[in-house]
Image (spheres, grey):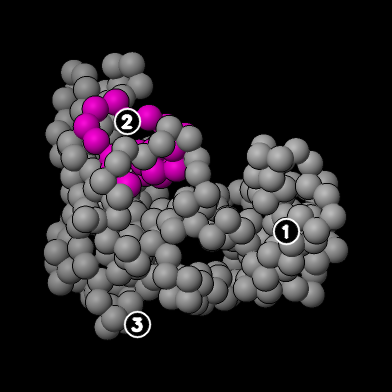
Amino acid sequence: MSLLEAKRLEKHYGDQVVLERLNFRVEPGEFVTLVGASGCGKTTFLKMLLGTERSSKGELLLDGKPIPNEPGPDRGVVFQKYSVFPHLTVLGNVMFAEEMRHSRLFGKAFGGTRRAAADKARERIAEVGLDHALDKYPHELSGGMQQRLAIAQALMMKPRILLLDEPFGALDPGIRVDMHELVTRLWQEQQLTIFMITHDLKEAFALGTRLWVFDKLRHDPQAPQAYGATITYDLPIDARQRQEGVPATFAESGIKTLTQETLL
């Protein structure tokens, strides 16, 4: 059984069709990079995986069962904008998820329970290289450090699936390289399955083991909202391509019309 499977999956908002005809299987440990023009439904798709958006038609299955219509500890998410709490320290931010889980089950965490949550949070913080900044607040951190913090938050509950929505889009090129190395290491060490949206083809080839291109196959000038985007290309990326980056010609990897400009 595949980890994730979609069968004729669609997402509509009223008369507007955002996504249609999505069919795929994803196995544990894959790193899927998603590219496509702005507004073609990539973030909507990620929200469907997260459980904050419901499908309109078809099936979206996790371990053969419908994905719950709410976020769960098996799915972590990191957005482009730093999704951290400004009033909490680095340690407090990462502890938050565990404290919320405990409060829902048993009430406020005290004593040994809180110490255990802090120890667990310190492990996640060390994994992303922020153990020197436990007591700092987000406004005292650089952009790259804030994204490291957001990743530590997402990993706090030991998810199986990590969803990344343009997580490095606001970072300088040098910092992005460091973040690429961090995400690659965490993916390998923690045996994560990752879905990452990016508008950078070079980044998509450098990180992923599989590239999905979202686009519309059908167009109706009289009713532009009648048809949605789907996965028009589903390409494996081998180790050589990850090292070399984008192929010299897109045709080498099966992409005949995609250019960097079409992703903006």
Residue 112 in the image: x percent, y percent?
80, 58
Which mark is drawn over residue 117?
1
Gap between marks 2 and 1 measured at Cα: 35 Å
Gap between marks 2 and 3 measured at Cα: 36 Å
Return the residue at label 2: 55
Name the residue nearer the viewer: 168 or 38.
168
Gap between marks 1 and 3 measured at Cα: 38 Å
Three-letter amino acid code at the position of disc 3? Gln
Within-10-Å neighbours for mark 2: few <14, some 14–19, many 20+: many
Name the residue nearer the viewer: 68 or 33.
68
Residue 247 in the image: x percent, y percent?
24, 74
Q: Is residue 18 magenta?
A: no
Figure check: 19 above or below 240: above
x 27%, y 83%: residue: 240
Q: Nearer the viewer, mark 2 or mark 1?
A: 1
Three-letter amino acid code at the position of disc 2? Ser
Which mark is drawn over residue 68?
none
Return the residue at label 3: 243
Within-10-Å neighbours for mark 3: few <14, some 14–19, many 20+: few
